[in-house]
Image (tube, helix red, strand yellow):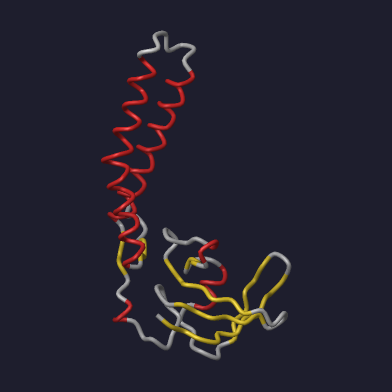
Amino acid sequence: MAEKEVLLTPEGLRKLEDELEYLKTRKRREVSQRIKDALDFGDITENSEYDDAKNEQAFVEGRIMKIENTLRNARVVDSDEIDENIVSVGRRVTLKDLETGDVFEYQVVGSAEADPSQSKISNESPVGQAIMGKGTGSVVDVEVMDGVLQYEVLKISR
């Protein structure tokens, strides 16, 4: 079965590559040393340090596998190839909530990079899906659990 393509910005690609390098070179070594130190305490049946280190090792290895899979299926979005006048992955978008008048600025990214706390929304999120391909001045409806929100696209930038 073919894996789903993952869209990344150049910044997102660098961030994942840096994390992978850190996990493979430094973090693996640190966890391995923790396991070795815990084994030096003797009996591992009641050794919480050993259990914690093994759990961390499983987490690190799982994260490495996830990043490698993401990178295998990644397509880096080149913002120079995309029309500057429409919302697409990699673009910054200023939206106005037509009900409240609140204004928000987001960067539209692929789902692997989404981080709402950093104002990075996924192109697959409800808001992301609604604004993709729209131009400045467009009004979009976003279905949420409580009804429908309306946003106006005020500005699109790099």
Residue positioned 73% across, 67% down in the render: 146
Residue positioned 41% across, 27% down in the render: 53
Q: Residue 8: percent from the left, percent from the top? A: 35, 65
In the image, taking residue 138 as reference, residue 80 lies left or right, namely left
Q: Residue 13: percent from the left, percent from the top? A: 32, 61
The outermost residue toward the top is 43
Task: Indicate whether 120 appears above or below 68.
Answer: below
Report the front residue among 6 and 117.
117
The number of callouts visible is 0
Task: Indicate whether 18 appears above or below 127.
Answer: above
Please state, as top left, top right, bottom left or bottom right, where the C terminus lies in the image.
bottom left
Residue positioned 32% across, 20% down in the render: 36
**Would you identify the image quadrant in which residue 87 lies?**
bottom left
Q: Residue 7: percent from the left, percent from the top? A: 36, 65
The outermost residue toward the bottom is 137
Report the front residue among 83 and 18.
18
Q: Residue 148: percent from the left, percent from the top? A: 69, 74
**Would you identify the image quadrant in which residue 81 lies?**
bottom left
In the image, taking residue 42 as reference, residue 105 lies left or right, namely right
In the image, taking residue 1 as reference, residue 102 lies left or right, namely right
